[in-house]
Image: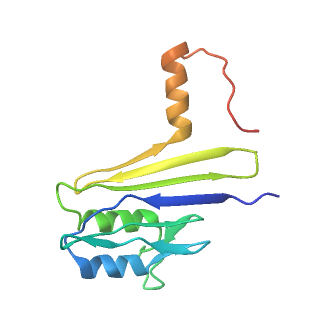
Amino acid sequence: MADYIATARTNYFRVTDEQKYQKLFKGLVSDNQLFDFTKEENGVVFHAFGSYGWISYETGQDDGESNDGFDFFLEELQQILPDDEAFVYQEIGHEKLRYVTGGAVVVTSKVIKQLGLDTLVKDTIETLLGSGNTVSGCSY
């Protein structure tokens, strides 16, 4: 049995509420060390983080509310993004050579959009060769 091995990273982004962001950041978890790349330039704080593993979110609270999972983190972060900012999360991973996969999430103050490498490749092949093509996938 193989384990899923991931690497994840965000862009640098700004928030409108540092206290709320710090509370959210404390709930981030990974199966490996989580790195905080926060920096300040010209008095502006830019946040970023990454890990040599997958990243998820847990509040640690058992209050009956659904406050766990990365989707919750994204929805909460969306509320504190400036209108002219975007948060980008990218993750790539593999399970030995059974498959290689990747995905990204782009969050603005108005939209959360998820992108998958597999879907991008499939759609590109269909655009180039048509929907009846016989191109095989990259997994077994």
From the top left corner, tell me how far across and down residue 97 is, in percent: 76, 45
Q: In this rendering, would 71 be left or right of 34?
A: left
Which is nearer the eye, 21 or 9? 9
In the rendered image, the vertical position of residue 81 relative to residue 125, given as above or below: below
Q: What residue appears at the point 24 percent right and 66 percent down from the top-left corner? A: 79
Q: What residue appears at the point 26 percent right and 82 percent down from the top-left corner? A: 19
From the top left corner, tell me how far across and down residue 88 is, in percent: 37, 54
In the rendered image, the vertical position of residue 6 relative to residue 122, given as above or below: below
- Quarter of the image with the C terminus is top right
From the top left corner, tell me how far across and down residue 103 is, in percent: 50, 48
Residue farthest to the front, as pictured: 42
Residue 130 appears anywhere in the view: no
Which is nearer the eye, 97 or 61? 97
Where, by quadrant of the figure, is residue 23 drawn? bottom left
Residue 79 appears anywhere in the view: yes
Q: In this rendering, would 27 be left or right of 45?
A: right
From the top left corner, tell me how far across and down residue 3 is, in percent: 74, 60
- Quarter of the image with the N terminus is bottom right
In the rendered image, the vertical position of residue 129 relative to residue 102, given as above or below: above
In the rendered image, the vertical position of residue 89 relative to residue 43, given as above or below: above
Scheme of colours in the image: rainbow
